[in-house]
Image (cartoon, grey):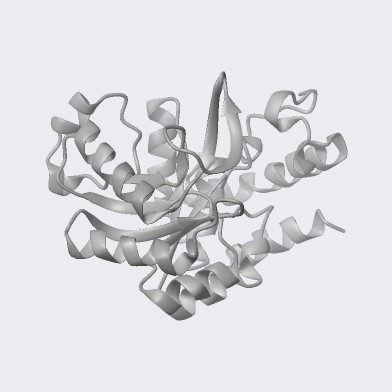
Amino acid sequence: MAIVKLSSVRQLKKLPREQVVVETKCGIVWERKGSLFNKVGDRQLYKNLSPESIREEVEASLQRLGIDYIDIYMTHWQSVPPFFTPIAETVAVLNELKAEGKIRAIGAANVDADHIREYLQYGELDIIQAKYSILDRAMENELLPLCRDNGIVVQVYSPLEQGLLTGTITRDYVPGGARANKVWFQRENMLKVIDMLEQWQLLCARYQCTIPTLALAWILKQSDLISILSGATAPEQVRENVAALNINLSDADATLMREMAEALER
């Protein structure tokens, strides 16, 4: 699945609707109260997954986008006190919206295994979002097997670890901003990753692809239920992302890449 962020509703309307998968989220609001989340500028954001709030958000999204239905509708963050909404109530309204044809698939982001089981207790869960890369494989412990057993698609984010797995980070790079406190951007770890990527060059030559394409191909190799959420700021990056779909990574090479990544943690 490829997801493209459109800069305007006009762009969306130029495309055949049946060829576009529209995904959006609910649960982070500013027009109504909820559990405190964070601030963007002077605007306070709240978590709110009440049925009333979700319905209001769906209608607003449909109106803004000028469409009749949303393909994937995902809860952004799960409900917490003091404005707590049980998952049963959230799922109930999502099921209603699906039956009404306003949404086609129900998703949930930032969930753990218990959240997933509770969603399934009260209805369907079609897709989740989770962090996953060859450097961060924690999802394999519980989330991925649970989703595999229940036919839930896993849409993974940060597959290139904020650019570290693109092969463009140099040894003298000094991380700042959001990267500064990330484990893999600590200098010793960063240099280990760069060494690993240099070893990947033989594989890149074998598959005639770039380093980021190889990193994405490894992820896709792990399960047929995985889709990738990967950003791009240039046409060439879009081509690299899509190229991963055409890489038939062998079991042996996928295992080799995993062993290289595991060695970094020793």
Q: Nearer the viewer, residue 47 or 134?
A: 47
Residue 66 position in % (x across, y down): 16, 35
The residue located at (45%, 52%) in the rendering is 49
In the rendered image, the vertical position of residue 39 relative to residue 111, given as above or below: above
Residue 162 position in % (x across, y down): 62, 36
The residue located at (73%, 56%) in the rendering is 261
The quarter of the picture where residue 122 lies is bottom left
In the rendered image, the vertical position of residue 40 relative to residue 46, given as above or below: above
The residue located at (59%, 54%) in the rendering is 80
Does residue 61 show up?
A: yes
In the image, taking residue 93 as reference, residue 247 lies left or right, namely right
Q: Nearer the viewer, residue 78 or 173?
A: 78
In the rendered image, the vertical position of residue 105 relative to residue 56, given as above or below: below
Q: Quadrant of the C terminus?
A: bottom right
The residue located at (81%, 38%) in the rendering is 191
Residue 56 position in % (x across, y down): 30, 44
Does residue 1 show up?
A: no
Q: Nearer the viewer, residue 194 or 199?
A: 194
Residue 206 position in % (x across, y down): 53, 52
In the image, taking residue 175 as reference, residue 167 lies left or right, namely left
In the image, taking residue 200 as reference, residue 185 lies left or right, namely right
Tally of marks? 0
In the rendered image, the vertical position of residue 2 relative to residue 219, given as above or below: above
Please identify the residue farthest to the top as the structure is shown: 42
The quarter of the picture where residue 39 lies is top right
